[in-house]
Image (cartoon, grey):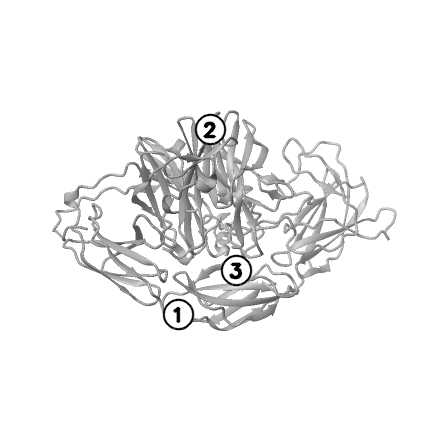
Amino acid sequence: MRRGYALLVVLTLLAGISPATVSVAAAPLPPVAVPDTALNAKWNAYGDQGGHWTGGDRTVSVPLPDGRTAWLFSDTFLGTVNPGGSRPANTPMPHNTLVVEQNGQLGPTLHGGTAAAPLPLVEVAGSPLTYWVNDGIVEGNTLRVLYTQIESTGGGGLDIRLKGTALATFSLPSLTLTDVRTLPLGDRIAWGQDMVTEGGYTYIYGSESQGNEPKRVHVARAATLDGAWQFWTGSGWSAHEEDSARMLTGVGQAFSVTKAGNEYVLMTIEGNLTFNPTLVAYTASAPTGPFGNPRPLYQAPEPGAGNRPVFVYDAAIHPQLSQPGKLVVSYNVNSMNPADNTADVKIYRPRFVDVTWPPPVPDPARLPGTPTGLSVVDTNDGGATVSWQPVSGQDLKYRVYQRDVTAGQEFFARHPEAHTGTTANIPFMRAGHTYEFRVTAQNETGESQPSGAVSLTVTGAPLRPPANVRATPNDSGGITLTWDRSPSPGLLLYQVFRSDITNGPSGSLPIGFPDSANTTVTDIGLEHDHVYEYVVTANRSGQASEPSTAVHATARYRKPGVPTNIRATPRPDGRIGLSWDAPGPDVWYWVYQRDITGNPANEFSKWPLPVPGQTTIVADSLLPNHTYEFKVSATNRGGEGDVSAPVQATSTMDTQPVSPGSVPPRPTAWVSPAQPGRSPRSRLLTRRAPWSPSPTRASCPRQHPATSSGIPPTSGK
């Protein structure tokens, strides 16, 4: 839920000229960027098949020497796709994967663990760190990839921080992971957002985050990634990372750089304005910048579509897919409501667009005149109203540009809305910051020259906290919070904070993303019988009110019902397939087994590991011609429910060889399923069951080796 993410996306609230003239008739220009329908269809078709990658973010592509492409992803949904295009609620999500493309065909998806219990492709045994992917390059006979190390700081979805940068090495052509090492770098810059090889060096770009400030670009270089790094100081190179100079302001967590012709092109989703869905390009004459001349290229249509809180992030250029005059660029799509990503598999997937490069230059004679009479008024609610005089012409729209002077923003950023009138209301401005505004007129040919700038220092009235906060538990382990809106003016966002006070006071953790539309949220994934304390704050333009009065509630889970319609089916290979009907969602299962041949009074033994969500399993390592009885119970965080009535089957062995069956083997490891209350870019996968398992009464079953066909190893009594 990487990097945000998986990202990780958080609400960081940031953010002369001639008089108007009459223009000649506009001549429409083709769009600078259009969706790449073939690439989008290819990835949707692959994801819809199920059984492997069904969605992911970051989307880095590395061409390999043998003609294949390694597609690198951070948080990745694996598993099945339901009829109708949804995902099962317990879909696993390892934090990084790799999809191989060969001869235009996608697959396989590479990950750690097993097919039944997938784990990240890159991780370090015993380490609590999560690895989110950045860019990779081929060095010699290896693929080397930089990963951002993420550390969990609490139980909330946003409780993560940058810990460092790691270098993973894969041997070629096998793509076998051979080494993961932490590089001697700090925790201030996420290195490896993109890499460009030029003149015997690899230039390594990084993004720096500091609180609510916009992200900034840094650049380093190295002859080899595991060798000595040098850091650009703004005028030269230093061996010390602390000397690295801040460059461009307002990039996304992930951005991309490539060389196109004689210039270097940096593309990013606009980061100077909150949730701006615009793809922007900057150019420079050298890999060290300075990057300037920002150009809005494409406005992603996904945010706002379908009445869902969808946002876009992580731009990546794919040079090996590009052609002269065209750059292939991807961006990622996510939702602030994690349930959306389960309900619709197509949301949490990359989108590809073809960008004309360099962009066509419109005929200045056909552009509209420049707006005049610009003014700005503080609305005293964390926003402003910008006004201007109209320009002569037909079917004109107006574009507002904004720059946060206090935050050190170098260039004006364009708001995504096109206005038909001569006023615009600007929200999400930070109290105490000085802003500048400009306006352009737009017709079918393009935009006019910008108006002269006007400035405003935002004041903002004091914020009052929400009132009448209520906490209501349900029997599914959730607690619903509701509150009355703050009486303070302006566009407010509400943030809920949770503390687990079962064993005394503890730190306060934010849950979910701040939201302005709702005054209710349900906190899920809590521990059974734990007591939680909640407060709510109102937020506006980077300021937060005092917390509301605290409320308390105890999370409780109702034990699941009894699985029904238990079936035990002998298989010709001596195993017995088991299946049953689920008593409800979000449960795992315990299987009980006994051999009643020769001693019907034998006690049932409980399998040592539960069955994670699926309703089919196979019992193996059985004695030929012995009759076995099986019972099944369901379990969740509330405990184990009642056990089903027993069913019988006799193990029989066919002398003819058979192909491995489709029934999954008894589990050999646990993997936490994707929790519906966490966003992909913010949650951290932990290797534990989603509740504490009941004690077992059986010894661990013997293990079978993996087969060459790729069938996962099985185990059983």
Q: Earlier in the sequence, mark 1 or mark 2?
A: 2
- For the point 39% across and 33% down, which residue is it? 319
User: In screen coordinates, is 83 left or right of 405?
Assistant: right
Instruction: In the rendered structure, find residue 462 and report the number of the disc placed on it.
Output: 1
**Could you tell me how far apart the alpha carbons at marks 3 and 2 are, in whole angstroms?**
43 Å
Q: Which residue is farthest right? A: 598
Image coords of residue 14 (percent x, y): 37, 56
User: In screen coordinates, is 156 left or right of 637?
Assistant: left
**Could you tell me how far apart the alpha carbons at marks 1 and 2 are, in whole angstroms?**
53 Å
Amino acid at the residue labelled 3:
Ile
Image coords of residue 406 (percent x, y): 34, 55
SS for tag 1? loop
Check disc 3: other Cα within 10 Å, few if <14, some if 14-19, many if 20+. Answer: many
Camera-side residue of 122 and 116: 122
Task: Say how many tags the image has.
Answer: 3
Check disc 1: other Cα within 10 Å, few if <14, some if 14-19, many if 20+. Answer: some
Amino acid at the residue labelled 1:
Pro
Amino acid at the residue labelled 2:
Ala
| Disc number lying in front (1 or 3) | 1
Instruction: In the rendered structure, find residue 223 and report the number of the disc placed on it.
Output: 2
User: In screen coordinates, is 705 left or right of 112?
Assistant: right
